[in-house]
Image (cartoon, rainbow, N blue to C red):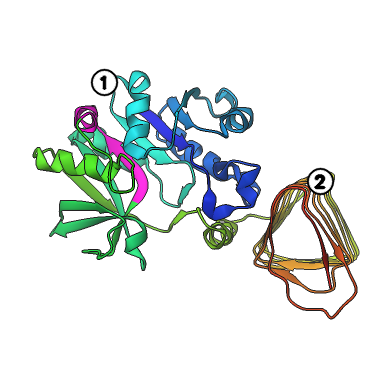
Amino acid sequence: MKALILAGGSGSRLRPITFSMAKQLLPVANKPVIEYGIEQIARAGIREFGIIIGDTGDAVRAALGDGSRWGIELTYIPQAAPLGLAHAVRTAQPFLQDDPFVMFLGDNLLKSSIEGLVQEFEAHQPAATILLAEVPNPSQFGVAEMAGERVVRLEEKPASPRSNLALVGVYLFSPQIHSVIETLQPSARGEYEITDAIQGLIDAEGEVRSVRVEGWWKDTGTVEAILEANRLILEDLSSGLAGEVEQSAVEGRVQIGRGTVVRNSTIRGPVVIAENCHIEESFIGPFTSIDAGTRVIRSEIENSIVLSECSILDVPARISSSLLGRGVRVVRSEGRPQVSRLVLGDSSSVELP
């Protein structure tokens, strides 16, 4: 079995961050989102990976390399235009050939293991296996209509959903999917929909199995979703203090990287701080991830993701529920303190009252 991970797309719902980086490389608990999926698939014993890339392909290649650090082999597959998930499969067909494969959306996070899913697929050899999760907003997803335990119909982002069961961004396919995709026409959105392809398998009386997700699942395509994913990952954080902590209170589950200095501060976990950071006279509150080389001086931040090489200096208002891009600089200006919520792209500079 092979793996196909989708790492294209523009990430329009995460702008301005994604003007300068791939959405799949945004860090959750200081690790790019896409790496969680790679690790899960590798643990299931799959070694040949195809990575669909688009305009941000160079950055994805630079971040992932050849896959050797996971004991896998990565093949990068350029997609000329983001014309839908089924189009991505069609683009990857020369790599996939006649092998069954697992397809994983590179901006999705799944708590549960997929090892059992892969084993079940290999044992029963259905035409496809899809993962389903109950969601409060099914019209934003592909939706499955069920008759008991049987999938009878799939629809992409329906205006009037027939159920609240959304397709999670993990699919397992037999090579039969390729012949169906060859017959597809673009949807009203102008894309070749994977839901239409799976519906084609159902219409051809192919066996399409479904599995309900255990634990949580997150599509990290919005700021709110990636902050929630950060919270969920940090819930399972284990403590580890490799840096230097002086005259500071470290409470709860906290990781501090090598070369990081924390002075006269309070760190209240779960919090992860990467290497070579400087935290002084500050408060770092729960569910915060701070990436390498960042300085936080006489400031407070909580429930936020801070990318590398940022400076947060003398900010009187507590920063909360924020996503700060690489090299962002947030400093104090004159004025009345107030709570701040920020979504800043790389190299931004902001003065706060």
Farthest-out residue, left: 205
Residue 146: x %, y % from top left: 16, 58
Quarter of the figure with residue 3: top left
Q: Using the image as rendered, state which of residue 107 and residue 15 is in the foreground.
A: 15
Instruction: Tell whether position 83 is magenta.
Output: no
Quarter of the figure with residue 314: bottom right
Task: Give, as a single range, the part of the protein colored magenta.
Answer: 168-182
- Residue 68 visible to an observer of this rendering: yes
Q: Are marks 1 and 2 in contact (CB under 8 Å)?
A: no
| Total numbered circles | 2
Provide the residue designation for mark 2. 293
Q: Residue at x 51, y 32 (%)?
A: 54
Residue 275: x %, y % from top left: 78, 45
Q: Using the image as rendered, state which of residue 136 and residue 281 is in the foreground.
A: 136
Provide the residue designation for mark 1. 98
Q: Residue at x 32, y 28 (%)?
A: 90
Q: Could you say whether the residue bearing mark 2 is in a helix, strand or loop?
A: loop
Q: Residue at x 36, y 66 (%)?
A: 137
Query: Which of the two labelled residues, at mark 1 and mark 2, occupies the earlier sequence position?
Result: 1
